[in-house]
Image (spheres, rainbow, N blue to C red):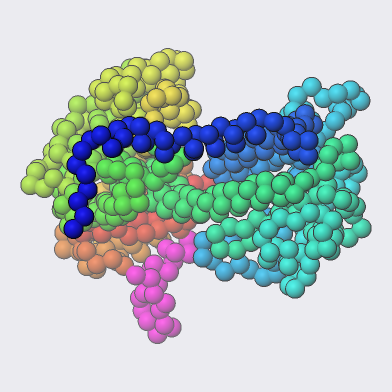
Amino acid sequence: MTEHPTSHEGRQPLAARQQERTRPRQQDAAAAAAAAAIPSPAAAPNPGPGPAAVAEAQAATRREGDRLRFVGAATRRIARGIDLDEIVLGLCRASVPTFSDAILVYLRDPLPVGDERPVSPFVLRLRRSDRLRHTDEEGGEAGTESERLRPLLSDPTADLMPAAELCEVRAGGALAEVLRGVRPVFGDSAAARAALPELLGAGRPVPTGHRAILAPLRGRRRVIGAAVFVRSTERAAFEASDLLVAAQLATHTALGIDKAVLYGREAYIADELQRTMLPDSLPQPTGVRLASRYLPAAETARVGGDWYDAIPLPGSRVALVVGDVMGHSMTSAAIMGQLRTTAQTLAQLDLPPQEVLHHLDEQAQRLGSDRMATCLYAVYDPVAHRITIANAGHPPPVLLHLGGRAEVLRVPPGAPIGVGGVDFEAVELDAPAGATLLLYTDGLVESRLRDVWTGIEQLRERLAATAQLTGDDHSPPLEALCDDVLDMLGPGDRDDDIALLAARFDGIAPSDVAYWYLEPEDAAPGRARRLARRALARWGLEEMSDEVELLVSEVVTNAVRYAERPVTLRLLRTDILRCEVGDDSPQLPRQRRARETDEGGRGLFLVNRLARRWGATRLSTGKVVWFEMATRS
């Protein structure tokens, strides 16, 4: 075995050996650096981009930024529109004059809604067109943008792109192919050269070069139109990147139109639903004049639970109803419709007001545990000049007297309909001739800015102030009074929908009423004829005596046949003559065609032929048969 020397004399230090190993590499690196520092005669210097290229790149960046800002601003302007016209106007105003000098917007006619199948043929109608007007009528420069924008609308004398108003898209034609392709195309492309004459009309000039863009408008499911952007020869032509801008404008417009059409359909349904839930027109009962108003809470909430009604009752009376179901939704409107129908049915039974509210409360509980509503039900009798009112948590009515004094009627407040387990009270009050009763919902008097009692006091003061304008001897016109009441609403006072019903009490004078009791016997029809003849003579209506006596005799004969208690006969003279015969039999008479061999069955046939109107109403104590005849001046 070889042994290595262990002496330290023959060995170098470790640091010295490391320096000897790294020295050659340091020398090589220094030589390489020195060589690199010496310029090579064969290597040419790199000058970098020139000033022209830098300026062109900056200009392109600015153009791209301007284009993006324009698209953002234009789409925001289009998106602000709610209905169809606002969206199309937003596209036109955003495009002219920033993007184009003229624009034509064609839409499908009619526009399909949602999943509806479009009708045939495929027809496009010019919905709107705008163009840049360089000079005004005087020949000078127009001052504002709005002065430079004028409708184009198929004007054959227009100096820039006249167009036809209607265009039928032929299946398989050039225009149909462009619309099916969805993407915008330049006007000088092969597809557009054949499509534009079909769209604009034969014989009309078509811009040459890249001065027109035809952009299809495609909604969510189908093509709904087309837009044509045009630039004049005084302006730079469209570039390839402008096709992307046109595509963005067309896409946002088409989607907005889709939403507007759907919104319009929903608004139409809501309006129709609300309209059918409310009376088309108010009746014209004897002794009272009526007027009404309804205002939705907002344009975006057109349906609600407020309703009003006026229901003629036997004895020339009229039931006045106003109610408010909680909420502003389709459900609220549906509940309101059911309660209104129930109230009409109960009113025809001639139930007292408190009983009507009791049955409405039961009906609301059957509809659901959370179906709550307020209601005020009043019955006006023009003969007795009295009104009976029952309340179910509704704001109290206001009575405006003939002299101009307005008072809030003190009626029992009651619990809302739907609570259950509560009793309703009725109060009977005077209803003097010439007075006006105002029934309303809480949307008229309550808002975020005021509580309900403050609003009621303001309403009372407003009615009194309006009455002072017409004097103490005259009542304000009913329609104008309703408008004046609604004018008291401020900008922040429309938090709820409003139903308003106004009733002007004219009454019937005692001298114009004749009332008798007749025993149910064979002699009753003869006695009824004599009493009717005397009443007509007292009123100066002798020329009507023959017809009235005949009809009174027929109706009383029919009543006596089934009655067990005394029959009532009443004549009322207003602008018409009304006759009412009541008995205790609940069976309503029905008109039928009598055979030649029948001895009876012709009474109601005569009533139907001679009277202006007639009818029968079932009461809780029997029925009333009535007829009306026009008085002869």
Q: Could one spot residue 176 in this view of the protein? A: yes
Q: Position of residue 616 (x, y in %)?
A: 32, 60
- Quadrant housing the C terminus: top right
Q: Closer to the camera, 382 or 177?
A: 177
Q: Provide residue 12's location: percent of width, then percent of height.
A: 31, 35
Tally the marks: 0
- Residue 597 part of the magenta segment: yes
| Quarter of the rendering containing residue 478 | top left
The furthest residue to the bottom: 597
504 in relation to 187, above or below: above
The answer to whether any part of residue 577 appears in the image is no
Q: Residue at x 39, y 30 (%)?
A: 494
The residue nearer to you, when weighing 584 against 495, is 495
Image check: 550 left or right of 631?
left
Q: Main secondary structure of the magenta part?
A: loop
- For the residue pair 379 and 21, the one nearer the viewer reads as 21
Residue plotted at (63% across, 38% down): 68
Residue 598 in percent (x, y) is at 37, 81
- Is residue 12 rendered magenta in the image? no
- In the rendered image, residue 295, in percent from the top left (x then y), is placed at 42, 37
Which part of the image, by quadrant, shows the N terminus? Answer: bottom left
Tell me: 290 left or right of 392. right
Residue at (77, 29) in percent of width and height: 51
Q: Is 404 drawn above or below residue 268 in the view shown?
A: above
Question: In the shown orientation, is residue 240 left or right of residue 329?
Answer: right
Question: Which residues fall within the magenta stretch?
Answer: 590-610
Q: Residue at x 61, y 51 (%)?
A: 251
